[in-house]
């Protein structure tokens, strides 16, 4: 399961990872996403989607809400669509990318604060002890996140994430994480934008973290990323320059019901469409679907372990610590008319580099 | 000082007001702002501004940042400008409009919770005792705000504010508060937007409150209003419908250093230009001005008691409980190159109905 790495810390965090394989492939997603003209000039704006209920649902929703003759026409300024990120826009297995980033930052944090070297959970992360790392609790991860995502200026954080993103690679594909976004979802985003929809990311991940690359990867500006947010503090550098510092204190957790609360805080209106993949997206989909007129709520089901991963535990898929698509969620999707996107049958291509 | 009113509560809160006169005038701002073509087709997009340093500063900033040949050219997607609201976009004297709203809502709150009738500060508000009302502390106002701005669904709140706004009138002009916006600032907003700037309101007032009318009055959508925010809670109505309820708990206070923190949270990047009028805008202007390239920081000085109000206490103007333009702020403006807008000399028209 584990593969070699130059850095013991980066070996260590892989103890949390499961079922990986290293498969180097050539190609570059960035070049593709940087050229939206490509998708638009194509005869089919959703070329990576196979014909079926999922593709049809997107096309129908856009037609119903943007055709001025439709009874469910929505004026352009009210067209809002939200996308979860992890597991909906990009790969979330075997570990959330931001957790990998946090673990990789532990050595730098301990270097600045040597007293942490003997304190848990930092001691375990530094040890590279795979078995111990695999047992880190959610609370441990939160402690690591608070320590590694705070104490720097907001600009310093952006520079560090950018730097890390340029170097870090996903263990299975040996490619930058930013290439592991789903081509069909990029096409759906572009298609919705081409029809006047304002696209938002609404993620349980860190708002500041995702903002660093959302422009380059998704064409989404910082103000359209809604995520879990820590506090920042205004102050002055020694030379008097104004400075915003990231604090080790959560302002709000943008997950589950928090996603709807975050949407209210950051957007101030109900989305017309929402895309998710797990129980953390449940309330966002409920809230979206409960509005008047034509509504679109979609859930990505990861049922393709050959091309990506397969996990549920709904529909007999293996359970997973992250991105849980439970049977209850599957049942609610059916009751509420949410559309399930089945990777295996609905997507003819998953990544741009394929 | 006090004038008659049908409602004792609304008489009462006017004990906080100073120097009012009732001056009914005809005209409608809404019709004007709903027609941006008007300003654009005019030979001078800043027609309500007299020639001078303030008007020149706006024109220069826009030219410097939008002319592709300029060394300080800013790409359209990075053009952000922020406006304080109270005292910068509309009249804040003799009382913040939102405080008037909260005081007016006290009877409805007490009707729903009769036990509050005997509890301060509600008792004082209901009494209509002007002398006692004038002595309400900031903490009392906060208690009233928490009680009157929470407990309802977000949709219920929007409906109530809309309803109130349609009826409430400013005591001096006997016009809806939404007509008491400054025509020169509307022109500046439209001019900036016409040059690709994304206009934001960054207010110490309630985010949910200002969002209700920001579209109609300023042409600004809900997601571009950053303000003091209370928590909302996701839940379900008795029939199972998803419901967001406003909670009596502050999430963040968007004032002073909080404005910069709010800008980071909600926008995620530094504005190129910012407009304010008081010490609560100080840090926003510092932060804006500290960025690279061409920067514009402006402060409205209310020095025109004939057409509006005159208060400082800088430059020998009378002190005011709200919207304080202190001598220290005036000094910092000079040191930092912020441009002071002097109502008396810089604006040839203050309101659209004039």
Image (tube, coloured by chain):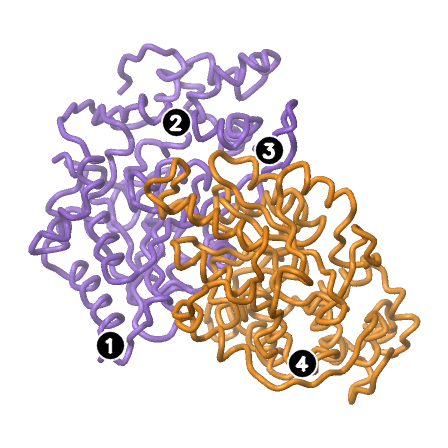
Chain colours: A purple, B orange
Q: Which residue is mark 3?
A: A247
Give the residue at the far right of this rendering: B131
- In three-dimensional space, the C-alpha distance between marks 3 and 1, rounded to whole angstroms, equals 48 Å
Disc 3 is placed on an element classified as strand
The image's mark for residue A100 is 2
Q: Is residue A273 left or right of residue A265?
A: left
Q: Is residue B258 above or below residue A74?
A: above
Q: Nearer the viewer, residue B85 or B292?
A: B292
Residue depicted at x 51% and y 32%: A154
The x, y position of residue A329, in whole percent, is 35, 56
Q: Which badge, 2 or 1, is on the more N-terminal residue?
A: 1
Give the residue at the far bottom of this rendering: B6
Residue A235 occupies quadrant:
top right
Residue depicted at x 48% and y 47%: B61
Q: Which badge, 3 or 1, is on the more N-terminal residue?
A: 1
Could one spot residue B140 in this view of the protein?
yes
Residue depicted at x 53% and y 21%: A121
Residue depicted at x 45% and y 64%: B44
Q: Nearer the viewer, residue B48 or A174?
A: B48
Disc 4 chain ID = B
Give the residue at the far front of this rendering: B51
- In three-dimensional space, the C-alpha distance between marks 4 and 1, rounded to whole angstroms, equals 36 Å
Q: Which residue is mark 1?
A: A68
The x, y position of residue B51, in whole percent, is 56, 58
Q: Is residue A313 above or below residue A179?
A: below
């Amino acid at each position: 399961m584990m593969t070699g790495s130059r850095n013991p810390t980066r070996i260590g965090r892989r103890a949390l990872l499961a079922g990986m394989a290293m498969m180097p492939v050539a190609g570059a997603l960035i070049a593709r996403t940087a050229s939206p003209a490509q998708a638009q000039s194509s005869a089919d704006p959703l070329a990576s989607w196979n014909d079926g209920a999922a593709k049809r649902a997107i096309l129908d929703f856009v037609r119903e809400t943007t055709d001025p003759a439709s009874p469910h026409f929505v004026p352009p300024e009210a067209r809002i669509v939200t996308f979860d990120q992890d597991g909906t826009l990009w790969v979330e297995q075997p570990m959330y990318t931001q957790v990998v980033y946090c673990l990789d930052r532990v050595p730098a944090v301990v270097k600045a604060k040597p007293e942490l070297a003997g304190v848990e959970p930092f001691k375990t992360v530094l040890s590279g002890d795979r078995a111990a790392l695999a047992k880190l609790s959610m609370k441990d991860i939160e402690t690591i996140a608070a320590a590694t995502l705070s104490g720097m200026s907001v600009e310093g954080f952006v520079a560090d994430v950018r730097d890390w993103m340029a170097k870090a690679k996903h263990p299975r594909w040996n490619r930058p994480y930013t290439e592991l976004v789903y081509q069909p979802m990029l096409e759906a985003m572009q298609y919705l934008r081409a029809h006047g929809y304002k696209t938002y990311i609404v993620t349980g991940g860190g708002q500041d973290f995702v903002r660093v690359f959302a422009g380059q990867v998704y064409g989404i500006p910082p103000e359209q990323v809604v995520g879990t947010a820590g506090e920042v503090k205004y102050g002055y550098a020694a030379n008097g320059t104004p400075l915003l510092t990231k604090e080790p204190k959560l302002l709000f957790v943008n997950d589950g019901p928090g996603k709807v609360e975050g949407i209210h805080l950051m957007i101030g209106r109900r989305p017309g469409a929402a895309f998710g993949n797990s129980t953390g997206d449940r309330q966002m989909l409920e809230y979206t679907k409960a509005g008047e007129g034509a509504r679109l709520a979609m859930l990505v089901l990861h049922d393709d372990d050959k091309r990506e991963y397969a996990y549920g535990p709904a529909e007999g898929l293996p359970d997973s610590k992250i991105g849980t698509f439970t049977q209850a969620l599957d049942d609610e999707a059916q009751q509420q008319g949410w559309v399930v996107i089945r990777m295996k049958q609905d997507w003819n291509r998953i990544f741009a580099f394929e």
